[in-house]
Image (tube, rainbow, N blue to C red):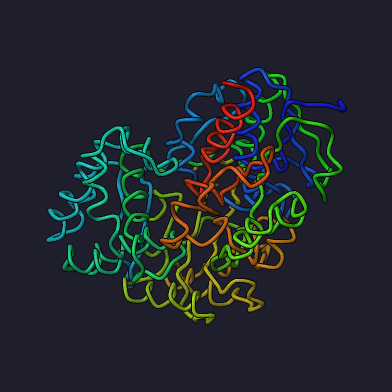
Amino acid sequence: MRTKYDAIVVGSGPNGLAAAITLARAGCSVVVFEAAETAGGGTRSAALTLAGFTHDVCSAVHPLALASPFFAALPLAEHGLNWVQPPAPLAHPLDGGKVVMVERSVQQTADRLGNDGRAYRTLMEPLAANWNDLCKSLLGPLRFPSHPLKLARFGLHAFRSAHGLARSLFKQEPARALFAGMAAHSVLPLESPVTAAFGLILGITAHAIGWPIPHGGSQKIADSLVDCLSSAGGEVILNCEVTSLDELPSSRVVLCDLTPRQVLRIAGNHLTTSYRRRLERYRYGPGVFKLDWALGGPIPWQAPECRRAATLHLGGTLEEIAVSERAAWEGRHVQRPFVLLAQPSLLDPTRAPNGKHTAWAYCHVPNGSKEDMTAPIEAQVERFAPGFKELVLARSVLGPTELERHNSNLVGGDISGGANSLGQLFTRPTLRLYRTSSPKLYLCSASTPPGGGVHGMCGYYAAQAALKDHFGR
């Protein structure tokens, strides 16, 4: 390790690595410090249950990674990253052995929605067709858009609540439930403003680019980014927890892939009192309770079409999902939680021994919850796949406390880097965005725009700010 660098990055999540790559490719000397044994942050994989079973510790399905302009500009395939596209991006089973599917084609999806098909097509078709232009505005900080009319069409619906939009546009339960499940990725009550935006973005990406999984596990994303950084001259130092900025080597800039709470802990003495107070007021959202299973066979869905998707939303109706998401914000638990489930081994046989399978699922719970949600989650799977429990060979249980212990950025189990409320959606964590009150300190985590998701854009924009301020580039 050198004694002086142009830039130091604290944290090796996708955003930290994106920041480091951006700086290294601009000619800066860069080092990344990571507290864990492996790089990756929210894109790690591990044998959480039994030998031979590979599980994604946090994120598993990555539409925004494929959508990311930054990732698209990197030769990640040359560094070992390969994507697997499921035949259908999403399955949403309903009671009675029924299922509603999101297909890659808007038309095919609409054809399955009966009388609501026309409304779905009218909503999604123009947005999906304009995704390449929209993503440049949506995956970045708030600024004047390069395609204002296209963004305005998106915003017309995006600022509404998911609950209101679903009820006004769709008349039947399948379409309402389908949109509610996608919007629930906001980790907000579905009656809140802008929750419709999350449903729209996930629906658009399903049609425009798909919801892929990385071949071999999410760790492959981190590994390819580390390899890309190394080829640009940067380095990653593992097993090196940074407890204070004062212990770092000399550098012109420091970028933190950390949420406000961790930034205050390691850099509080470098920040002004007023800026510290603003970070202290930053709000975190609900946590998640996560299960990983080693299975003796594929999940026995009542609706066989569920096997065509890597991602499933288990929540029944719009109203049932709304009750579950509202409860997490109000500090309550429900017996029928909305469950997000991934079954990667159906598409990627490297994840499990021959004939065996893996699955991953979580539900939203109050921040810092101590409640064991194993039984309610497994009951929801059993509801749509009778006989599922008999296939469980082993399970890994990660509640909010365990998730935060694994990754300190997951404060209280919050996987989004902070609440996605309207007040924090565009100006997170403060109006300074990536810059702080210390001229050499920058933030590059999901607590900055465009927020959560594996896309690297937070790191890219933070690095661009540092290059402009300190390197004249």
Seen in the image, is 237 located left or right of residue 69? right
Return the x and y of residue 400 as percentages of the image width and height. Answer: 65, 67
Question: Where 421 falls versus 325 (above or below)?
Answer: above
Q: Residue at x 25, y 48 (%)?
A: 154
Number of marks in the rendered image: 0
423, 220: nearer the viewer: 423
Residue at 56% over, 52% down = 447
- Which quadrant: the N terminus? top right
Say above or below: 128 vs 327.
above
Q: Report x, y in % for residue 403.
A: 68, 61
In the picture provided, is 440 more to the left or to the right than 161? right
Examine the rendered structure and indicate whether residue 196 appears above or below residue 449. below
Residue 300 seen anywhere in this rendered image of the structure? yes
Residue at image location 53% in from the left, 43% down from the top: 454
Toward the viewer: 11 or 54? 11
Q: Quadrant of residue 16?
A: top right
Residue 367 appears at what percent x and percent y? Answer: 60, 71
Residue 278 at x, y percent in the picture: 59, 60
Quadrant housing the C terminus? top right
- Specify whether 3 is left or right of 454: right
**Is residue 266 toward the left or the right of residue 340 in the image?**
right
Q: Is residue 143 above or below residue 23?
A: below
Indicate the quadrant where residue 112 lies.
bottom left
Could one spot residue 350 in this view of the protein? no
